[in-house]
Image (cartoon, rainbow, N blue to C red):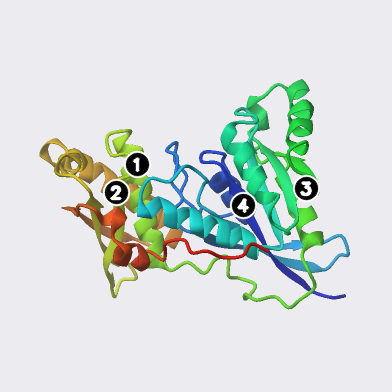
């Protein structure tokens, strides 16, 4: 039997539930997910090995892309460029739509952009547990009128409904080719990057709307210890002085809470004890600094031909 390996990219409007679905399909918590829109900033890879209809094992490389939204800053434009670049490289594009939100102008705009690409696209109606079942088929029909999706799946990333059927279909749709990753590898992410993302997740969760999108996190140091634990030093960068005070909190309470929660999540992810030391730094204009964006793996969009 021939082996199969391919790339499936998750794209959609912000807060469609892409990252939650990505984590569900991979079976690990690789992509951070918060109630805030625009949480995902980079294209994140996760590797799934699943049985295809022929009985062989298929390697599915899933790509969690930044959400599609109206850009304001260099950071936003770089995120959108990364999203559409990832979609253009995929063997199958998975268009994730919040079933509760329906056919919004944002969803219509994405469908129109997909229509200019030659990659096959599947429609994934997500959050079906939040919508009355009689409304789902009319919504799917309405979306198919905007774009001829190859397949349609109704899923709930939160509960896992429909995830197994989606994995099986993806396994059969990947092209023939050798597997690119060792069987035990589920991502190409570094532990330093994962640490920064987990801290950023807690910044969003613990600060509510007080620090919208003007925060980024970098792992400054990584010290392996003889007892098997690791000491991680991280810096949270914010754009304005008031945000620094908010994240530190009265008597340092909020930054301690962020550190405590992030330490627990990171320790579970790494399977060992983590000593996490955080500081907050004001870095005005970091989201417009091309050198900083390049260090994050983001670049400004360029004119490119879609395929």
The disc, 4 or 3, on the residue closer to the chain's N-terminal end is: 4
Distance from the alpha carbon under mark 4 to that under mark 2 = 24 Å
| Residue 120 coordinates in the image, percent (x, y) | 75, 56
Query: Which residue does the image show at 30% across and 71% down from the upper left?
Result: 227
- Label 1: element kind: helix
Where residue 133 is drawn, which disc sits there? none
Residue underneath mark 3? 165
The disc, 4 or 2, on the residue closer to the chain's N-terminal end is: 4
Residue underneath mark 4? 10
Mark whose residue sits in front, 3 or 1: 1
Contact check, label 1 and label 2, Cβ < 8 Å: yes
The quadrant of the image that shows the C terminus is bottom right
The disc, 2 or 3, on the residue closer to the chain's N-terminal end is: 3
The disc, 4 or 1, on the residue closer to the chain's N-terminal end is: 4
Distance from the alpha carbon under mark 2 to that under mark 3 = 37 Å
- Label 4: element kind: strand
Residue underneath mark 2? 215
| Residue 94 coordinates in the image, percent (x, y) | 68, 50
The disc, 1 or 2, on the residue closer to the chain's N-terminal end is: 1
- Residue 158 in sight: no
- Residue 130: which quarter of the image? top right
Mark whose residue sits in front, 2 or 3: 2
Residue situated in front as seen by the camera: 188 or 141: 141
| Residue 129 coordinates in the image, percent (x, y) | 66, 29
Residue underneath mark 1? 204
- Label 2: element kind: strand
């Amino acid at each position: 039997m021939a082996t199969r390996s391919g790339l499936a990219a998750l794209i959609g409007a912000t807060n469609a539930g892409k990252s939650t679905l990505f984590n569900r399909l991979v079976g690990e918590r690789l992509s951070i997910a918060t109630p805030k829109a625009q949480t995902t900033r980079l294209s994140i890879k996760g590797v799934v090995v699943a049985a295809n209809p022929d009985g062989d094992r298929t390697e599915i490389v899933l790509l969690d892309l930044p959400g599609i939204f109206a850009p304001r800053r260099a950071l936003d434009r770089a995120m959108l460029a990364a999203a559409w670049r990832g979609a253009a490289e995929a063997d199958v594009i998975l268009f994730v739509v919040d079933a509760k939100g329906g056919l919004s102008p944002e969803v219509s705009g994405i469908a129109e952009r997909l229509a200019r690409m030659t990659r096959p696209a599947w429609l994934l109606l997500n959050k079906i547990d939040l919508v009355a079942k009689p409304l789902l088929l009319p919504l799917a029909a309405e979306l198919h009128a905007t774009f001829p999706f190859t397949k349609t799946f109704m899923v709930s990333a939160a509960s896992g409904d429909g995830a197994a059927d989606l994995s099986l279909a993806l396994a059969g749709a990947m092209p023939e080719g050798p597997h690119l990753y060792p069987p035990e590898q589920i991502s190409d992410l570094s532990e330093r990057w994962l640490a920064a993302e987990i801290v950023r997740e807690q910044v969003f969760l613990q600060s509510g709307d007080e620090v919208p999108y003007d925060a980024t996190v970098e792992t400054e140091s990584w010290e392996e210890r003889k007892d098997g634990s690791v000491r991680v030093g991280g810096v949270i960068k914010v754009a304005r002085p008031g945000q620094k005070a908010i994240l530190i909190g009265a008597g340092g309470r909020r930054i301690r809470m962020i550190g405590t929660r992030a330490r627990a999540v990171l320790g579970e992810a790494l399977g060992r004890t983590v000593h996490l030391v955080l500081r907050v730094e004001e870095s005005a204009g970091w989201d417009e600094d091309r050198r900083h964006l390049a260090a994050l793996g983001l670049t400004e969009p360029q004119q490119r031909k879609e395929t």
